[in-house]
């Protein structure tokens, strides 16, 4: 027992000494999450914790990559400190206020995390004699260790949480519910990091050590991945035949299927890479030879599908990245077809280079191209549809709901990308003042809208921006979120407010003692005025009055979400004003 304890202690000590910064980043991530759970922070603190958590989480993979580099060049402390400086800079990439944090930062966060993991794959293999073999062995061991880490962490986390539950139920301990979230955070982040590092033992020297080829890789590729690829390629080639015969443009969704086929195929080739030179493995040789050739017509289809969307709607970050991956895929295909000394290192290195280009290259990165494209799209829409007078938008001009939604979509997109100054060039002085005051300033600006369709989901949202009401004649305020029912008393009078989800016959009843009033007919009559509307309708006032024998109740809605197909209504932030007669 003593020897085993000493062995465990020595492994933990070696782990901390080998990977101090990786463990520190993992621990910091857990601390941020636990602190956020325990303290119930306000919005400002919560946003700060979000920024810290994302930054520390990125530090786990980036510091592991730099540790691998340090072990290769024997003097990597400078690089690891550079990694710390990079994380500090990454933290300040985010806006200082939550209101300025938008979906665009997702296109920074996700690619950066992917790039940090790609860095792990190749950073220590810039110079090495047996580069190809060592590179494959290193990544193979990382992949296996990652899979084992997921299994071990899943079992450990589930077991510990079940143990906490058992103690709570059997011994009547009153644990706070937060303990389960905190335990999950600690084990899934710090626990999984520690397990993964333990599997990697000494690091680079252990990971690139040559071992026997895992038979499971061959089985998995031969009997699972390749059959899937055959299904994919048959579907795609038949689709190519269909659009050629019908002479029609491909659907945008086909891009994802082509990319899926390409990525799964490349992954399959990497799994069986050491076997491709063995004559006995004829199926591997055949697959390796024909795979990249099968991609050529599919790449043509991919570019046609992408540019169909781009020419119609312009660039966005998502379309930019899909196009970028397509260009990278084309580069990989021609590299492996024409290069006589092709190396599998080219795959992660080239993808990393393309990713860095998309994020930081001046003027033609994902964000610059997308913003400029949407600016041009907006200007073209306004000009072609004659919605401008003397360079400013005429919000009183007749406009179809579909065009209104398209213009508002451009406004929203550019507003979220800190391009408000450009938008202001189209606005008069009165409208400019709204831009800084209201996040959704662009809703309801057009005054002469013709509603032509009900939208794909048969959904209409009727809402108001009115947030000030006179209550001098009312003595009581009742508040309810969404469909929350209310039961309360005023003096000796019992008040019940209920509404149902009955699709055929929804009800919204207010009962005072034995007197019952259903206000649903009022709501239906009001909503029916907008039954041909498209998605969003702004109204000046969204309130209803109900009279009882001894009381009058005024109902104030923030919005009514009306699903016209199912005749279903949902109410947000409902307030009731009550006065005695």
Image (cartoon, rainbow, N blue to C red):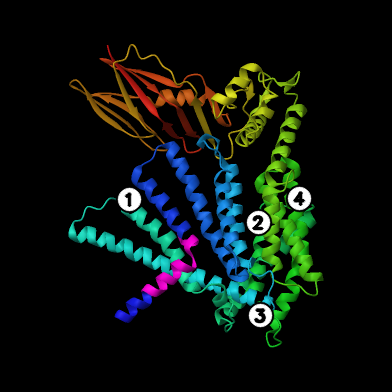
Residue 363 disc label: none
Q: Which quadrant of the structure image shows residue 80?
A: bottom right
Q: With 340 as the anchor, is 507 left or right in this view? A: left
Q: Secondary structure at mark 4?
A: loop
Q: Quick one: quadrant of the N terminus?
A: bottom left
Q: Secondary structure at mark 2?
A: helix
Mark 2 or mark 4, earlier in chain: 4
Name the residue tied to disc 3: 274
Residue 178 disc label: 1
Magenta-drawn stretch contains 17: yes
Mark 4 or mark 3, earlier in chain: 4
Residue 533, given in percent of the width and then of the height, sits at 57, 29
Name the residue tied to disc 4: 249
What is the magenta range? 9-23
Front-lying residue, 207 or 221 = 207
Which residue sits at x=43%, y=34%?
A: 570
């Amino acid at each position: 027992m003593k020897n085993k304890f000493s062995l465990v202690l020595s492994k933990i000590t070696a782990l901390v000494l080998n990977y101090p910064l990786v463990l520190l980043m993992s621990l910091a991530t857990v601390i941020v999450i636990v602190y956020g759970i325990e303290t119930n922070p306000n919005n400002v603190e919560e946003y700060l914790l979000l920024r810290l958590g994302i930054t520390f989480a990125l530090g786990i993979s980036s510091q592991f990559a730099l540790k691998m580099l340090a072990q290769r060049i024997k003097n990597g402390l400078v690089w690891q400190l550079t990694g710390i400086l990079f994380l500090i800079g990454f933290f300040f990439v985010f806006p200082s206020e939550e209101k300025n944090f938008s979906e665009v930062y997702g296109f920074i966060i996700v690619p950066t995390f992917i790039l940090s993991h790609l860095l792990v794959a190749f950073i220590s293999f810039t110079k090495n004699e047996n580069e190809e073999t060592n590179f494959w062995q290193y990544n193979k061991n990382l992949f296996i260790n990652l899979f084992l880490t997921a299994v071990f962490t899943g079992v450990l986390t589930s077991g510990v949480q079940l143990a906490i539950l058992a103690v709570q139920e059997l011994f009547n301990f009153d644990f706070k519910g937060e303990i389960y979230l905190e335990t999950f955070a600690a084990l899934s982040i710090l626990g999984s990091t520690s397990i993964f590092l333990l599997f990697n033992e000494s690091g680079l020297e252990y990971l690139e050590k040559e071992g026997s080829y895992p038979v499971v890789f061959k089985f998995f590729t031969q009997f699972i991945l390749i059959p899937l690829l055959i299904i994919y390629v048959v579907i795609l080639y038949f689709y190519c035949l269909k659009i050629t015969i019908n002479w029609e443009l491909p659907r945008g969704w086909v891009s994802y299927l082509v990319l899926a086929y390409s990525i799964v195929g490349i992954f399959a080739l990497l799994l069986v890479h050491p076997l491709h030179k063995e004559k006995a493995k004829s199926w591997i040789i055949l697959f390796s030879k024909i795979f990249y050739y099968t991609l050529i017509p599919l790449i043509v289809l991919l570019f046609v599908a992408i540019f169909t969307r781009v020419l119609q709607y312009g660039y966005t970050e998502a379309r930019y990245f899909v196009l970028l991956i397509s260009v990278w895929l084309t580069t990989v295909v021609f590299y492996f077809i024409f290069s006589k000394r092709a190396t599998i290192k080219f795959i992660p290195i080239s993808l990393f280079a393309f990713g860095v280009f998309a994020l930081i290259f001046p003027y033609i990165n994902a964000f610059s191209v997308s913003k400029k494209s949407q600016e041009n799209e907006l200007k073209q829409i306004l000009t072609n549809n004659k919605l401008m007078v003397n360079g400013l938008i005429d919000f009183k001009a007749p406009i179809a709901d579909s065009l209104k939604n398209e213009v508002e979509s451009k406004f929203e997109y550019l507003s979220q990308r800190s391009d408000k100054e450009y938008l202001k060039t189209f606005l008069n002085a009165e409208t400019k003042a709204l831009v800084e005051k209201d996040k959704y300033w662009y809703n309801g600006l057009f005054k002469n809208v013709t509603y032509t369709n009900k939208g794909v989901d048969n959904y209409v949202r009727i809402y108001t921006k009115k947030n000030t009401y006179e209550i001098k004649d009312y003595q009581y305020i009742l508040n309810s979120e969404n469909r929350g029912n209310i039961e309360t008393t005023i003096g000796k009078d019992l008040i019940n407010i209920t509404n149902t989800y009955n699709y055929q016959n929804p009800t919204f009843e207010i009962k005072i003692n034995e007197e019952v009033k259903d206000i649903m007919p009022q709501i239906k009559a009001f909503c029916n005025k907008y039954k041909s509307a498209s998605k969003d309708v702004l109204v000046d006032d969204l309130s209803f009055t109900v009279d009882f024998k001894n009381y009058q109740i005024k109902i104030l809605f923030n919005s009514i979400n009306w699903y016209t197909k199912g005749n279903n209504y949902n109410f947000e932030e409902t307030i009731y004003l009550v006065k005695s007669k």
